[in-house]
């Protein structure tokens, strides 16, 4: 007999319940993903052990995990700000590239004969962060203005803006910022402008602290301030927000600027912390993976951090799993997809309960109440 879905009076908001369903979803995804290992004659336990051991039990692997998680955290924060305001922005690939180009230009202009000249690192990083925030905010703000003022479709517009950003970077690395040689890339950035490493023997850079600072700011502003309340109400019910005196259009434009700035910071940490030059194809889909990380984190800043680290760890451990268990790395992408699907499906339990007829407890038949004895008047 089939189970019956019964809608709850209100969704479950308990942190423990959400954490439990998320962990159960991950376990089920790994369980079903393990079935894919059987045709290769691999032991699922050994394969998963190699996957997570490489990413989280060695300093070198954990350093690479943090490097890959840092831009995902920033992209997921931008997704949270935009989507919780009802602004379905998908242009974080473009924001990342624009932020990377901006950081590259600022870094190259800090040479002795550059526009800014030699700068102490604290002043340089503040200047680079400010420039990336402004350019990324303007880039996404264009889409926000189209949506807030003219009612344009932000999904289509933001996706098209991704291609514009790709062509802008291709133009820069093939023309004004091209280094001598055959490869389309910028000159190597000055060593003084690199983000310093903080784990000896690894490539974990201090960009992770920029990401964690942004997590704190987004958590405070979005969940503990009046502006954050207005942003969330705008996303939940725009009509009710307008009735309550909230300017929905301006709040969505504000969310677009904030989301674009956070996406641009992802490009900054990639250029200053990892590649140390502007490259064609720099993003590698990070803008879209960050959106997935935000969804896995239930659109909560702290959840996005956990989801980003988990996703990055699986990407880092895929090579180790391929070497030790003899499995193709493509399997890990299937497992990642299963995790996403199971976690998104687990939200169903927050809004509905499962009622199985054969598990119902028997109910005792109700006994009708006895009718009171009616006595004649005067007796």
Image (cartoon, rainbow, N blue to C red):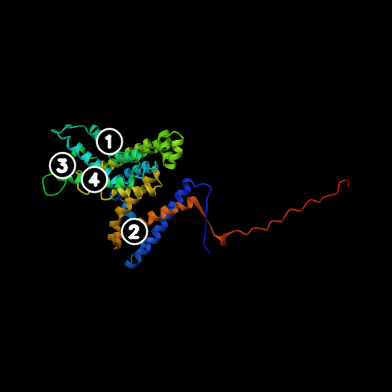
- Give me the residue at 31% from left, 52% from top: 55
Which label number is shown at residue 193? Answer: none
Within 10 Å of the Cα at label 4, are there few (<14), some (14-19), or many (20+) other Cα atoms?
A: few
Nearest to the eye among marks 1 and 4: give it. 4
Which label number is shown at residue 164? Answer: 4
Estimate the spatial distance between the alpha carbons at disc 1 and disc 4, rounded to whole Å.
18 Å
Residue 345: x and y, percent?
43, 54
* Residue 272 in the figure: left or right of residue 211: left
Nearest to the eye among marks 4 and 2: give it. 4
Residue 341: x and y, percent?
39, 55
As helix, strand or loop, the secondary structure at mark 4 comes to helix
Estimate the spatial distance between the alpha carbons at disc 2 and disc 1, rounded to whole Å.
37 Å
Within 10 Å of the Cα at label 1, are there few (<14), some (14-19), or many (20+) other Cα atoms?
A: some
Query: Dot 2 corresponds to which residue?
Result: 334
As helix, strand or loop, the secondary structure at mark 3 comes to loop
As helix, strand or loop, the secondary structure at mark 1 comes to helix
Query: Dot 3 corresponds to which residue?
Result: 177
Query: What are the residue bounds of the magenta stretch?
Result: 45-49
Residue 88: x and y, percent?
36, 45
């Amino acid at each position: 007999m089939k189970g019956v879905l019964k809608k709850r009076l209100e969704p479950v908001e308990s942190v423990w319940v959400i954490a439990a369903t998320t962990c159960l979803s991950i376990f089920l995804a790994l369980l079903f993903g393990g079935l894919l290992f059987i045709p290769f004659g691999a032991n699922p336990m050994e394969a998963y052990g190699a996957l997570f051991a490489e990413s989280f039990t060695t300093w070198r692997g954990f350093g690479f995990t943090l490097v890959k998680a840092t831009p995902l955290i920033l992209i997921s924060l931008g997704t949270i700000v935009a989507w919780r305001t009802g602004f379905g922005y998908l242009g974080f690939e473009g924001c990342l590239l624009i932020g990377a180009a901006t950081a590259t230009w600022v870094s190259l202009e800090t040479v002795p004969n550059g526009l800014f000249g030699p700068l102490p690192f604290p002043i340089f990083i503040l200047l680079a962060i400010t420039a990336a925030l402004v350019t990324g905010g303007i880039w996404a703000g264009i889409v926000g203005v189209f949506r807030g003022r003219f009612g344009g479709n932000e999904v289509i517009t933001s996706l098209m803006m991704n291609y514009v950003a790709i062509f802008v970077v291709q133009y820069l690395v093939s023309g004004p910022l091209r280094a001598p040689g055959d490869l389309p890339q910028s000159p190597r950035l000055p060593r003084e402008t690199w983000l310093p490493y903080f784990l000896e023997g690894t490539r974990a850079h201090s960009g992770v602290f920029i990401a964690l600072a942004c997590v704190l700011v987004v958590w405070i502003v979005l969940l503990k301030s009046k502006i954050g309340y207005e942003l969330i109400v705008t996303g939940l019910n725009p009509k009710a927000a307008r009735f309550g005196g909230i300017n929905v259009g301006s709040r969505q434009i504000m969310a677009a600027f904030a989301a674009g700035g956070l996406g641009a910071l992802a490009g900054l940490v990639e250029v200053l912390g990892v590649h140390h030059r502007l490259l064609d194809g720099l993003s590698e889909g990070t803008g879209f993976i960050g959106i997935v990380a935000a969804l896995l984190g239930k659109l909560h800043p702290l959840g996005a951090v956990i989801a980003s680290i988990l996703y990055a760890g699986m990407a880092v451990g895929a090579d180790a799993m391929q070497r030790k268990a003899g499995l193709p790395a493509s399997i890990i992408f299937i497992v990642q997809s299963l995790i996403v699907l199971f976690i998104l499906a687990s939200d169903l339990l927050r809004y509905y309960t499962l009622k199985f007829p054969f598990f119902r407890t028997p109910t005792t038949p109700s006994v009708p109440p006895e009718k009171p004895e009616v006595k004649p008047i005067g007796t």
